[in-house]
Amino acid sequence: MTDRSPSAESGEQALEDPSAPAKNRMAVAVLTLGGIFLAFYLVANNLGWVPRVPCGTGDCGIVQSSKYAWVGPIPVSAIGLGGYLALFVLSLLGLQESMAGSRLIALLLFGGALAGVLYSGYLTYLEAAVIKAWCRYCVASAVLITIVFAATIPEVKRIRGVGAG
Amino acid sequence: MKRFYVVLGIVAVVGAAVVAVALRGGTPVIEPVDLGDITDQELVDLAQGVVYGDPDAPLTIMEFADYQCPSCGYFALSVKPFVDTDYIETGQAKLVFHDFPLDQHPHAFLAARAARCAGDQDRYFEYHDEVFRTQMEWTGLANPAAHFKDLAGDIELDAGAFGRCLDSDMHADVVTANRRLGERLGVGGTPAIFVHDGQALTFVPGFEFAHVQQAMEAAGSGN
């Protein structure tokens, strides 16, 4: 008789080892924590807590003071901050033993990161084609959310009920 | 898991430290300051305008303006060029620009200080024109400081010196004194133009070029 893990025995819907901490979620937590600080700094700039984002290359001032830096009364950077916070909390929840196998957490992590990378792509397009100025902090955030999204790809397996390490 | 929490802790501490350092930058003064009990003479001495043209020109055109005021922008960009051609460049008059930031314009004081910071690098009127030219771009911003610094970069000012000046209280007393001087002269709105012939100060009842022409002719201008 083949030696099988308890999760495999319970069928395809279960994860191979739901209680094991998922390394991709650890990566998401660390990356989004960095994103929180980055986005918070940009929010502080938008709200005037700091006079200016110092920029050696590109032009953060033009980007940050453009009409695209705000969605109504909300700075775009605040939306990013909210997104990073949500992904950070979800990744920590997903690392808890009791929620390691949650498909909802997996769905929210992957869906949130996908939404983030799509919105970030749109903002990067605006910088390149409409504003014609680059803010290196915004570019850094775009790169960061892309890596976060890549780190959430294993969540697809969890959403589909297939084990992911 | 232990290693993960150690890494997370390191990221948290480093991130918080970097943001704290970044937020600790100077705070720009954006509104009039308390000048204390100063005499009229001290006020006049402090409320220095910025001279454009020959300082020894016989006539003086005094302008009290607010950088966030659209009519001041109109005067600066559409009327002043004719004043330059007919009176400043011919040596008949000099223009002395005085700040008069109005209460209803929240960025006017900072803009006035920004222009004075540019003046520290002998580029006052070049910067003055840029601030007025881009008025619609910054007037609706929550904080136009970044825009003002970008303008300084656009005209190739020393960005570091300009930034340190703007992120401080430099010139706040002078701008405040300028406004108080205007109030003493009865300025109620902007732009307010006066012509001084060395003896009498005459208020110009308007800010179109024709108004300036009439006042200059009355003051004895050759044009």
Image: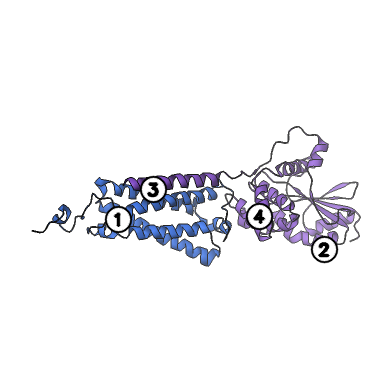
Residue depth check, mark 3 versus mark 1: number of the one nearer the observer: 3
Report which residue position mark 1 lands on. Answer: A107
Element type at mark 3: helix
Element type at mark 2: helix
Report which residue position mark 3 lands on. Answer: B7
Query: Given the image, what chain letter belongs to the residue carrying mark 1?
Result: A
Q: Do marks 2 and 3 share a chain?
A: yes
- Label 2 with label 3: CB-CB less than 8 Å: no
**Quarter containing the C terminus of chain B:** bottom right
Residue A18 in view (yes/no) = yes
First-in-chain label (4 vs 2): 2
Q: Which chain is purple?
A: B
Q: Do marks 4 and 1 share a chain?
A: no
* Shown colour of chain A: blue
Q: What amino acid does circle 4 point to?
A: Ala
Q: What amino acid does circle 2 point to?
A: Thr
Query: Given the image, what chain letter belongs to the residue carrying mark 2?
Result: B
As measured in the structure, the alpha-carbon distance from the residue carrying label 3 to the one carrying label 1 is: 25 Å
Q: Residues within 10 Å of mark 1 (few under 14, many from 20)?
A: some
Query: Given the image, what chain letter belongs to the residue carrying mark 3?
Result: B
Report which residue position mark 4 lands on. Answer: B159
Q: Which is nearer the eye, B74 or A119?
A: A119
Q: What amino acid does circle 3 point to?
A: Val
Q: Do marks 1 and 2 share a chain?
A: no
First-in-chain label (4 vs 3): 3
- Residue, x 49% and y 60% (percent of image)? A139
